Image (cartoon, rainbow, N blue to C red):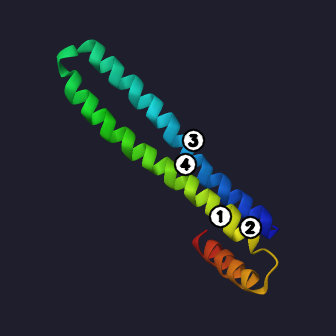
Amino acid sequence: MPVLGTIAIAAAIAVLCGAAAALAMSHATGKAVESIARQPEAAGKVNSSLMFGLIMMETCAVYALLVAILIVFILGSQVGTPAAAEHTGRVLDLLRAIA
């Protein structure tokens, strides 16, 4: 597989983390609204727990976006240089060892 293809796949995996965080946020919000509708007196506790969870999920999505941008612009700009070829070879060897 070409190096640019590997970089594109790595960036896509990082973006999938952001998409998963968005789906998790929508699911958590829906469940929080359901629980508040069933038990309105617990709205304060549910809202505070929901906000903490949403902050954690949003942080994950932001980090995934940052990683995707770094992969595309840093690794993508180094393709073709001798140092990048050596580094890419080491990364691919690591990935093969893990798989």
Judged from the image, the secondary structure of the residue bearing numbered disc 3 is helix
The amino acid type, in three-letter code, at marker 4 is Cys
| Mark 4 or mark 2: whose residue is earlier in sequence | 4
From the viewer's perspective, tell me whether residue 32 is left or right of residue 19. left
Q: Whole-Å distance between the Cαs marked 1 and 2? A: 7 Å
Instruction: Say which of 53 and 93 sits in front.
Output: 53
Give the number of the disc on residue 19: 3
* Percent position of residue 52, x then y: 31, 41
Question: Relative to residue 42, is residue 64 depicted above or below?
Answer: below
Q: Which residue position is annotated with label 4?
A: 17
* Percent position of residue 22, x then y: 51, 37
* Percent position of residue 67, x then y: 57, 60
Q: Which residue position is annotated with label 2?
A: 76
Judged from the image, the secondary structure of the residue bearing numbered disc 1 is helix
Q: Which residue position is annotated with label 1?
A: 71
Q: Are marks 1 and 2 in contact (CB under 8 Å)?
A: yes
Q: Are marks 4 and 3 in contact (CB under 8 Å)?
A: yes
For the C terminus, give its image quadrant. Answer: bottom right
* Percent position of residue 4, x then y: 79, 65
The answer to which image quadrant residue 25 occupies is top left
Q: Are marks 4 and 2 in contact (CB under 8 Å)?
A: no
Of labels 2 and 3, the one closer to you:
2
The amino acid type, in three-letter code, at marker 2 is Gly
Q: Are marks 2 and 3 in contact (CB under 8 Å)?
A: no
Q: Whole-Å distance between the Cαs marked 2 and 3? A: 22 Å
Residue shown at the point (66%, 60%) measured from the top left: 10
Give the number of the disc on residue 51: none
Instruction: Say which of 62 and 85 sits in front.
Output: 62
The amino acid type, in three-letter code, at marker 1 is Ile
Q: Whole-Å distance between the Cαs marked 4 and 2? A: 20 Å
Badge 2: residue crowd in 10 Å (few <14, some 14–19, many ≥20) = some
